[in-house]
Image (cartoon, rainbow, N blue to C red):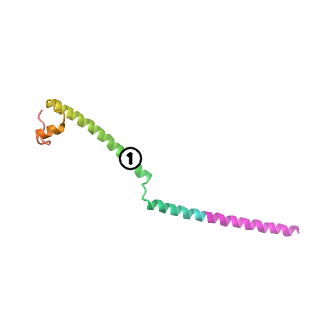
């Protein structure tokens, strides 16, 4: 009777081990399928990669800084031009009155 119950428990243990292996394999298959579906879903959404986002962000920051520098330079040039022309405060007035903006300045 001892051998019979031992064999019975051994068979049950083997069955449980096999069932655990099958469950683990099934879990890996489900995980792989879910991951593939999620990657497909993200690819269909046309999302931007992090590296691309960072590159565009840096380009925008550089463009913003250049824009601010050019704006400051333009303000200084307008002030200098107004001083040279005796108080005209707007460059557009000078361009309209002065003719061709591409012509060389005499001064």
Question: Would you call the spot at circle 1 few (<14 residues within 10 Å), some (14-19), or many (20 or more)?
Answer: few
Question: Seen in the image, is 43 located left or right of residue 26?
Answer: left
Nearest the viewer among 88 and 53 is: 88
User: Height in image: 47 above or below 65?
Assistant: below
Nearest the viewer among 14 and 94 is: 94
Quadrant of the image for the C terminus? top left
> Residue, x 41% and y 48% (percent of image)?
54
> Residue, x 39% and y 49% (percent of image)?
55
Asked if residue 15 is among those painted magenta in the image, a careful observer would answer: yes
> Residue, x 55% and y 62% (percent of image)?
34
- The image shows residue 104 at horizontal and vertical percentages of 12, 39
- The image shows residue 84 at horizontal and vertical percentages of 15, 30
Residue located beneath label 1 in the image: 57
Which quarter of the figure has residue 47?
bottom left
The boundaries of the magenta stretch are 1-27
> Residue, x 27% and y 38% (percent of image)?
71
Quadrant of the image for the N terminus? bottom right
- The image shows residue 44 at horizontal and vertical percentages of 44, 62
- The image shows residue 19 at horizontal and vertical percentages of 70, 66
Q: Residue furthest right?
A: 1
């Amino acid at each position: 009777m001892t051998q019979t119950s031992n064999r019975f428990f051994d068979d049950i243990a083997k069955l449980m081990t096999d069932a655990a292996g099958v469950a683990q394999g099934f879990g890996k298959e489900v995980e792989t399928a879910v991951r593939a579906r999620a990657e497909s879903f993200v690819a269909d959404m046309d999302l931007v990669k992090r590296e691309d986002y960072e590159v565009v962000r840096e380009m925008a920051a550089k463009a913003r800084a250049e824009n601010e520098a050019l704006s400051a330079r333009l303000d200084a040039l307008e002030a200098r031009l107004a001083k040279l022309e005796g108080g005209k405060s707007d460059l557009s007035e000078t361009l309209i009155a002065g003719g061709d903006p591409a012509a060389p300045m005499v001064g």
